Amino acid sequence: MELACEVTSYAETLPGLEQYAVKKFAEALECVPKALAENSGVGRPMDVLSKLYAAHNEGKKYAGFDIEPEQVSGGTKDAVEAGILDLFLTKHWSLQHATRAATTVLKVDQIIMSKQAGGPKTPKQAGGDWDEDK
């Protein structure tokens, strides 16, 4: 979540379409905590996410959500104090590979959209689906 906040603030410094692209990348980074909250079984995942956003906006950069029943923490927990740590290399390479995969898909989409390939036209079938029994 903190990375998404940092990328969003960086996007504010960029001009034009670059800003839009970087903001969308930050939005994509927010999908991970959102999916974790929705799949963790907490009663209201959107409430937990709003508390998480608020905690990060207050400067609590290690805030994560607590899947235990809500206690004094209000659904968030300091991950470092709780001993919940991720390996840097795992996150680094996950982001690197995910970004490369998305970039590859976008490049292929641009190639497909740019012009139609030549070649023979596919013949029209008489009607119905190819697997339909007659």
Image (tube, grey):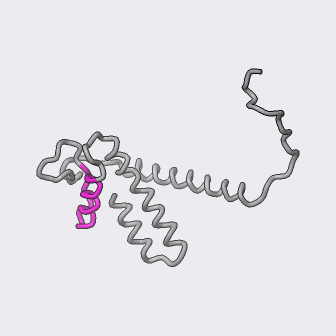
Q: Find the residue positioned furthest to the right.
A: 120
Q: Quadrant of residue 52?
A: bottom left
Picture residue at 26% right of the left edge, 52% below the top = 48
Check if residue 104 falls in the magenta segment.
no
Q: Is residue 89 above or below residue 129?
A: below
Picture residue at 50% right of the left edge, 69% below the top = 20
Q: Residue 91, image x and y in percent?
A: 40, 51
Q: Is residue 82 above or below residue 21?
A: above
Q: Residue 72, image x and y in percent?
A: 11, 51
Q: Is residue 125 left or right of residue 5?
A: right
Q: Considering the image in quadrants, where does the C terminus appear?
A: top right
Picture residue at 41% right of the left edge, 66% below the top = 7
Q: Residue 5, image x and y in percent?
A: 35, 65
Picture residue at 41% right of the left edge, 71% below the top = 10
Of 5 and 50, the residue lying toward us = 50
Of 102 and 87, the residue lying toward us = 102
Q: Residue 6, image x and y in percent?
A: 37, 66
Q: How many marks?
A: 0
Check if residue 50 falls in the magenta segment.
yes
Q: Find the residue positioned furthest to the top.
A: 134
Q: Is residue 120 above or below residue 60?
A: above
Q: Considering the image in quadrants, where does the N terminus appear?
A: bottom left
Q: Is residue 97 left or right of residue 38?
A: right
Q: Is residue 74 left or right of residue 4?
A: left
Q: Quadrant of residue 123?
A: top right
Q: Which residues are magenta?
A: 47-65
Of 47 and 62, the residue lying toward us = 47
